[in-house]
Amino acid sequence: MLPFVIGVVIIVLGLALSIGLHEIGHLVPAKLFGVKVTQYMIGFGPTIWSKRKGETEYGVKAIPLGGYISMIGMFPPAKGEQAKADSTGFFRGLVQDARASSTESITHGDEDRAFYRLPVWKRIVVMFGGPFMNLVLAVVLFGVLLMGFGVAQPSTTVGSVSACALPATSERQTCEPGDPAAPGAAAGIEPGDRIVSVAGRPIDTWNESTAIIRDHPDDEIELVVIRDGEEVTLVVTPMLSERYATDENGQVVTDAAGEPATVQAGFVGISPASETVQQPVTAVLPAVGENIAGVAGIIVNLPHRIVDVANAAFGPEERDPNGPISVVGVGRVAGEIASLDEIPLASKAAGLIGILASLNIALFVFNLIPLLPLDGGHIAGALWEAIRRGFAKLFRRPDPGPVDLAKLMPLTLGVVVVLGAMSALLIYADIVKPVTLF
C-alpha cells in the first residue's frame, strides 16, 4: 500500500509543479510588459496559504486541479454603448458582469497597465507563456527519460520459443494436441540465444532477422547464434503461416477497414527479449512531437471517446487504455507502477517520469484549444484583433479597436459546463471502471 501512495503523491506533486510553472509562464512576461498582476494562485477554492509581495498575492488553494493569475483589465470597456441598468437577461448579465469586474480591477493610476491595452503580440506572448512552460518541461522530462533511462526495444536475443505454430489471428494462446510444432523449437533454438546471422546475412536488429525469415517459407536456412559464449549453427525451416503484415519498422499495418492486415509469410516461432537502450538527444523532439500528435488526436475525437467512456462506465464494455482519463486515473496508474514488484526501481522511476512528461504535453495541447476560458481562446481573440486592424489599415478604415472578448462570456460558461461534465464523467469512470494497464 505504501508504494502505491508514494506513486500517487509523486504525481500530485509533479502536477502541482507543472501547474505552478504554467502560471509562471504567464506571470513573468505579464510583469515584464508592465501589466499589474494582483494574484498568482495554484489551485481553486478556499485559500490555504498566501503571502503578498509587492502588488501581487501569491498563494495555494484547496483544490489542486489548476491555477491562475489575475491581471487587471482583461476586457476592454463597452464601445459606444451603455449597459442597461434594467436588463434582466441572463446572458447579458454575464457580459456586463465580466466588463464590470474587469473595470473594477483597474485602480486609479494603473489605467495604462491593463492587459487589454497591450499590443497584440505582447498579449499573445503572455497567454502562450503558460503552455510554452509545459512544453519546455515536457522536453526536459522526455530528455531525462530517453537519454538517461533509455527505451525498451527488441534485442537480437531470443526471449521465448513457441512450442507450436498458431496463426496470428488465432484466439488461442496455448498449444493443444494436434497443433503443428513450431520450426524454432524443432531446430533447437533456445531462450537466451543471441542471433548473429540468418541465411548468411549478419543481423544487427531483430526486425532484420524477422524480414529474412518471412521471405524464406519452406526453405532450409542457417541460423547462427551465440550460446553460452560459443557460436552455434542451427538449421531451421520456416513454415508458411498467416502473420500480421508489418512495415519497415516492424509495426503492424492496418487495412482499409482499420483492422490489422495479414499475409502469408515464413514463421519460426521465436520472440525477442527486450533491452533498455539510451537514446541520442536527436530522439527527444521527435518523441515530443509524437506525443503532441497523439494528444491532439484524442482531443479531435473527444466527443466519440467520451461516449465510449460513458458506455464503459455504465455498461459492460472495457475502457480503452489509450483513451482519456482523469487525474484520478492518472494517479491510480502511477500508484500501480510504483507498486509493481516485478520491475526494478529504475523502471518505476522511468514510468513516473513518462507520466509527468505526458501530462505536460496534455496541458500544452489542451490549453491551446481556441476557446475561452483557455489560453488558446485569448490567443485566438488577439489574432482576430490583429486581422481586423490589419484589414482596416489596408483599406484606410478607422481602427476598430480591441476585440471585446467579454461578449463571449455565454460561450465561455458553456465551455466550463461541458468541461466540468466531462471531468466528472472521467472521474466516475476511473473509480468504477479504471483503465487497466497491468
Image (spheres, rainbow, N blue to C red):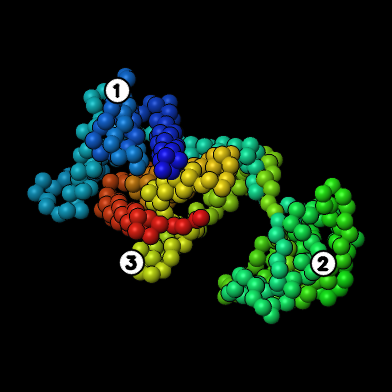
Side of 347 relative to 199 (left or right): left
Q: Secondary structure at mark 3?
A: helix
Residue topped by disc 3: 314
**Label 3 sits on what residue type?**
Phe
- Indicate the quadrant where residue 40 lies: top left
> Is 144 rendered above or below residue 290?
above
Q: Going from the N terminus, do you reach mark 3 or mark 1 first?
A: 1
Side of 41 relative to 145 (left or right): left
Q: Pick whichever, 417 or 350, lies toward us.
A: 350
Which residue sits at x=23%, y=24%?
108
- Indicate the quadrant where residue 272 lies: bottom right
> Is 130 rendered above or below residue 424?
above
**Label 2 sits on what residue type?**
Ala
Comparing labels 3 and 2, the label whose residue is closer to the camera: 2
Residue 245 x, y percent position in the rendering: 69, 70
Comparing labels 1 and 2, the label whose residue is closer to the camera: 2
Q: Residue furthest bottom?
A: 178
In three-dimensional space, the C-alpha distance between marks 3 and 1, rounded to whole angstroms, equals 45 Å
Which residue sits at x=74%, y=71%?
182
In three-dimensional space, the C-alpha distance between marks 1 and 2, rounded to whole angstroms, equals 73 Å
Residue 353 x, y percent position in the rendering: 53, 40
In three-dimensional space, the C-alpha distance between marks 3 and 2, rounded to whole angstroms, equals 51 Å
Comparing labels 3 and 1, the label whose residue is closer to the camera: 3
Residue topped by disc 2: 187
Q: Is residue 421 among what the camera can see? A: yes
Residue 28 x, y percent position in the rendering: 43, 28
Local crowd at mark 2 within 10 Å, few (<14), some, or many (≥20)? some
**Label 1 sits on what residue type?**
Lys
Side of 281 relative to 399 (left or right): right
Residue topped by disc 1: 51
Which residue sits at x=87%, y=50%?
230
